[in-house]
Image (tube, helix red, strand yellow):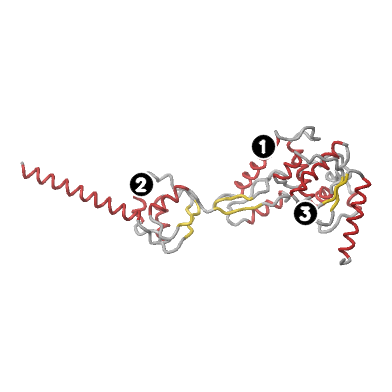
Amino acid sequence: MKSVLIFGFGLLALAIIAASAGGYFAYRETTRSGPLEQETILLFESGASVSRIANQLNEAGALRHPELFVAAVRMRGAQSDLKAGEYLIPADASVMEIIDILIEGKSILHYFTAPEGLTTAHILKLIVSAEMLEGDVTLTPSEGELLPETYGYSRGETRDQLIRRMAKAQEGVVDELWDGRALELPFSTKQEAIILASIVEKETSKADERPRIAAVFVNRLKKGMRLESDPTIIYGLTGGEPLGRGLRVSELKKETAYNTYLINGLPPTPIANPGRGAIEAVLNPAQTDDLFFVADGSGGHAFATTLRAHEENVARWRRVERQRKNGG
């Protein structure tokens, strides 16, 4: 009996030693520097199994023992925690470090920028040309529905998903700013605010001018004056495509739903996608009695409260135009 007990204890000791040795090996192999010689970008597709991920890493030279990667993931109970995406795997990354990267889901971000003042058609063309986005554009957002901004996205995001994000962002900005709007504005709906903001966006590229440009239009609407905005005429003629020249007198008189020299109030839709600054400007315009503005030759505008002062500003601008034309 004594010899049997000694033999049993011996087997147990060997098992403990073996388990300890195996555990030490696993710990050492999963925490020591990996074999990857230089940082590598890998794309792990949605739905990929742990084994498939291990094979990708192994083919890229990031693992010594792919089966050990699978075992380590299972040991951590992380089979469903590895996130799809495009990842930068650092040189010398250990198995555990790679698993942490995939669990954290901090995939590589690409960026898409929609400049302020573009039409929806122009923004959709940019989205179509963004190489890292996937899928066709099947959505048809309305004019003014998308927020011009820079958006980060992971490789594999679809074009429709980005469009939905842009529309949700625009809605969020309007909702955020709406309750803080000035009193007695000459419009009552969020859509009307977007329409006016799109006109302000097209009239100036200077952020500090937007509240004053907005004030001119707000003041004119309050007095029942027509907006007389050239960008609205161009939109009615081309749908937002650049005209490539100055407006003709005949075009100023051409009847369209967007000719604010002829129609009262706002046009029926936005003429572009306004950014946050333009929306803020129309909801809280500058406190001024200005009713007119014209280019001043420096990239900004000269403002006036009376027609006579405005005509003087126009004459001054015409002189600047002639001097430029003559090379003066």
The amino acid sitting under disc 3 is: Glu
Residue 295 seen by the camera = yes
Instruction: From this view, report whether residue 284 is shown above or below residue 85.
Output: above
> 50 and 301: which one is in front?
301
Residue indicated by mark 2: 74
Q: Position of residue 152 (x, y in %)?
A: 58, 50
Among numbered discs 3 and 2, the one appearing first in the sequence: 2
Is 133 situated left or right of 7 in this image? right
The amino acid sitting under disc 2 is: Arg
Residue drawn at point x = 84 percent, y = 58 percent:
245
Among numbered discs 3 and 1, the one appearing first in the sequence: 1
Residue 104's disc number:
none
Secondary structure category for the residue under label 1 = helix
Query: Disc 3 or disc 1, which is closer to the eye?
Result: 1
Q: Position of residue 91 (x, y in %)?
A: 43, 60
Residue indicated by mark 3: 241
Residue drawn at point x = 69 percent, y = 37 percent:
177
Separation of disc 1 and disc 2 at Cα?
Answer: 45 Å
Residue indicated by mark 1: 176
> 96 and 167: which one is in front?
96
Q: Quadrant of residue 30?
A: bottom left
